[in-house]
Image: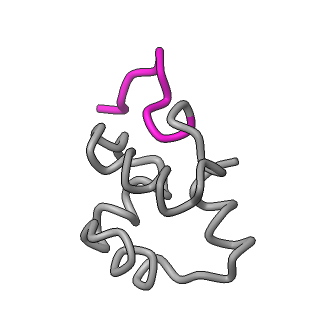
Amino acid sequence: MTLRQWLEAQNLLQKEFARQTGICEPTISRIVNGRIMANLADAARIIRATNGAVPLESLIRAGRTRAA
């Protein structure tokens, strides 16, 4: 499950999730929209906040490179 899917399933706004995790809202937005990969600290916070429903693999997109 992606972070976007989880947020939608929980009917949770990015702003609310940002507050819950301590990750700034623009960073959450960039992760959700695939503009950046989560760093390991943020990924750990997201995984904890979602009780593992959003796996590490969906946050770091292992093996893929960022768009230029």
Using residue 38 as the reference point, say whether residue 1 is left or right of it: right
- Name the one closer to the observer, 1 or 49: 49
Inspect the magenta stretch and tell me whether residue 64 lies in it.
yes
- The image shows residue 20, relative to residue 37, as above or below, that is below
Magenta stretch, main secondary structure class: loop
Q: Residue at x 29, y 69 (%)?
A: 26
Q: Horizontal and vertical percent for residue 3?
A: 57, 56
How many discs mark residues in the rendered view? 0
Instruction: Specify the quadrant of the image occupied by residue 39.
Output: top left
- The image shows residue 39, relative to residue 5, as above or below, that is above
Q: Horizontal and vertical percent for residue 30?
A: 37, 57
Which quarter of the rendered picture does the C terminus lie within? top left
Instruction: Specify the quadrant of the image occupied by residue 25.
Output: bottom left
Using residue 36 as the reference point, say whether residue 8 is left or right of it: right
Q: Residue furthest top?
A: 63
Q: Horizontal and vertical percent for residue 62?
A: 47, 21
Using residue 6 as the reference point, say whether residue 20 is left or right of it: left
Q: Residue at x 47, y 15 (%)?
A: 63
Q: Residue at x 69, y 60 (%)?
A: 5
Inspect the magenta stretch and tell me whether residue 52 lies in it.
no
- The image shows residue 25, relative to residue 65, as above or below, that is below
Coloration of the structure image: one colour
**Which range of residues does the magenta coloring cover?**
58-68
Q: Residue at x 59, y 81 (%)?
A: 12
- The image shows residue 46, relative to residue 11, as above or below, that is above
Q: Residue furthest right?
A: 9
